[in-house]
Image (cartoon, rainbow, N blue to C red):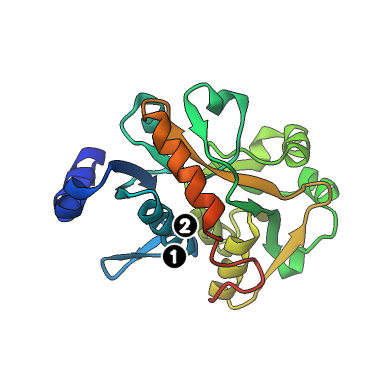
Amino acid sequence: MRFFDRAIILALFLSPALSQASCNLRVGWENWHPYIYEEHGAMKGIEYQYLMALADAADCRLVFVELPWIRALQELEQGNIDVLYGASHSPERNRFATFSRPYRHEEMVLVTHQRRMTTDFSDWAPRNRIGLIRGFQYPFEIERILAGMPEPQKTIVSADDQLLMMILADRIDGYLVERIVADWQRQQAANTLQITTIAGAEQEPMHLMLSKQLPDTVLTDINSAIESIDYPVTNTDIPF
């Protein structure tokens, strides 16, 4: 479904509540198990639950617009959507977006077949095929290692689910995702995958990215909500 078709449908569905809110925000999203996803026509996931809690505290209403991540960044820059979640701060992104205070931290890990397990990403990377997400900003130490890899060994895709399918089909040898996503995907693959911590890749703070076209009061209200509402789960207690 095209961007505006999807947005209009969701807006019509939510219109009574939208008219009563002090702010209405268009949120770019895509299936990202177990953070946010659609199941049997309903949206679910820990990130979705948290976004809804923040919106309620900030007296805002959310319209969810389904977009791939790289397209969502472009739409935010153009002002066609208002909010993205799970975003790392960077000078480039700061050019067209404002950032909330951090609301959680994220650890990037390497996922491989158990038969190709490793304890050292810097040693593994130059000799293997790796899957990466288009438009994703990896921690500095990971970016440094990736920069030294030959380009043909890198496969760029649009979503985490594609990485899982590709490794199960032996089209890549490993890929980089968030630890919570890796834990969920290992469950889907009947524990045939290995998760490796990457030395030097510290946990990064995650922010909401907001369009610079929004009033400053929206960011103020969202930051206040983040201060008062704890993120619902940690890496150790997520329900699969």
CB under 8 Å between callouts 1 and 2? yes
Distance from the alpha carbon under mark 1 to that under mark 2: 9 Å
x, y percent for residue 156: 55, 41
Where, by quadrant of the figure, is residue 151 drawn? top right
Identify which residue is drawn at 61% across, 63% down: 180
Indicate whether 236 appears above or below 212. below
x%, y% of residue 147?
Answer: 73, 32
In-front residue for pair 185/42: 42
Q: Nearer the viewer, residue 13 or 71?
A: 13
Type of amino acid under label 1:
Gly
Helix, strand or loop under label 2? loop
List the residue tagged with mark 1: 45
209 or 116: nearer the viewer: 209
Percent coordinates x, y for residue 87 in the rendering: 55, 42
Kindly tell me whether residue 145 is visible in this rendering.
yes
Q: How many labels does the image show?
A: 2
* Percent x, y of residue 161: 49, 58
Around disc 1, counting alpha carbons within 10 Å, would you say few (fewer than 14), some (14 to 19), or many (20 or more)?
A: some
Mark 2 highlights which residue?
32
The residue located at (54%, 66%) in the rendering is 232
Residue drawn at (55%, 43%) of the image: 207
Mark seen at residue 222? none
